Image (tube, rainbow, N blue to C red):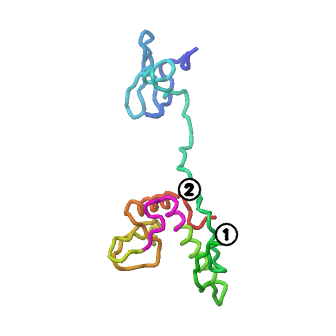
Amino acid sequence: MVYFDGIKIGDRVWSFEYGWGTVKELIYNSPYPIGVVFDNEQYETFTLDGKIEKSCNQTLFWDEIKFEIPKKHKIKLKENEYFIDLEISEVVNGCKYAGYGSGLRRDDKETAEKALKQIKNFMRLLALRDQECPNSRGYEFKLGERNYCLFKKEETGEYDYDNSYNCNYLGVYFKTEEDAQKICDILNYGRFDLEGE
């Protein structure tokens, strides 16, 4: 038994490529007996199994197939070998330490919460860069060279990048324009949330 067993002229059918159409002719001695005129006036013929070519997958159906287009997977941070403890100002793993200085306290809770949010966003962006961009891993601003740094456009909320030779904005820098663009794309397409967990 074939998929379009019992099909007749005037039946409505649906195609992945062309959408809705109407069966206009049936030529049973042909390898492609079903002739369909689609609502966009495109004409195509199909096998009784709904294939536009015998070697292809079925593309013609009795009814519309609804499906959700999969989104690109979300990026999860895997950087977790060394723990940066901001309270005791050192990097901890066994006996490996690196001092980070003070400046971690504020006189009011609201300012402290804002500072913490900025620190978290900075650290997550730094970790994302180091994980996803091997060429820029650990990269720091270099005077007189191209240094790519991200910024967020206020009017659109999208991320973009700029380059600087002489201004150190104390941000997360990228060695190459390609790496900066890659991270902008990841953030703009929602594959990573700087404020997430």
Q: How far apart are marks 2 and 1 (CA)?
A: 28 Å
Question: Which of 193/63 is in front?
Answer: 193
Seen from the viewer's position, the closer of residues 188 and 35 is 188
Is there CB contact under 8 Å for labels 2 and 1? Answer: no
Residue 189 part of the magenta segment:
no
Question: Circle 2 sits in a helix, a strand or a loop, which is it?
Answer: loop
Considering the numbered disc 1 on the image, is that residue within a helix, a strand or a loop? Answer: loop
Residue 169's x, y, as percent?
43, 79
Pick the front one: 97 or 84: 97
Mark 2 vs mark 1, foreground winner is 1
Three-letter code for the amino acid on which mark 1 is drawn? Gly
Query: Residue drawn 62% across and 84% down?
Result: 104
Nearest the viewer among 192 and 94 is: 94
Q: Position of residue 170 (x, y in %)?
A: 46, 78
Reply yes or no: does residue 135 show up in magenta. Answer: yes
Label 2 vs 1, first from the N-terminus:
2
Circle 2 packing at 10 Å, graded few (<14), some (14-19), many (20+), is some
Name the quadrant of the N terminus: top right
Residue at 43% across, 24% down: 52
Check the picture and name the quadrant holding the C terminus. bottom right
Most extreme residue toward the top, as rendered?
29
The span shown in magenta is 126-140
Quarter of the image holding residue 26?
top left
Specify the farthest residue to the bottom: 107
- The kind of residue on which mark 2 rests is Ile
Judging by the rendered image, the residue that carries numbered circle 2 is 75
Circle 1 sits on which residue?
94
Q: Residue at image x 40%, y 66%?
A: 175
- The dot on residue 174 is none
Q: How many marks?
A: 2
Left or right of residue 176, residue 105 in this image: right
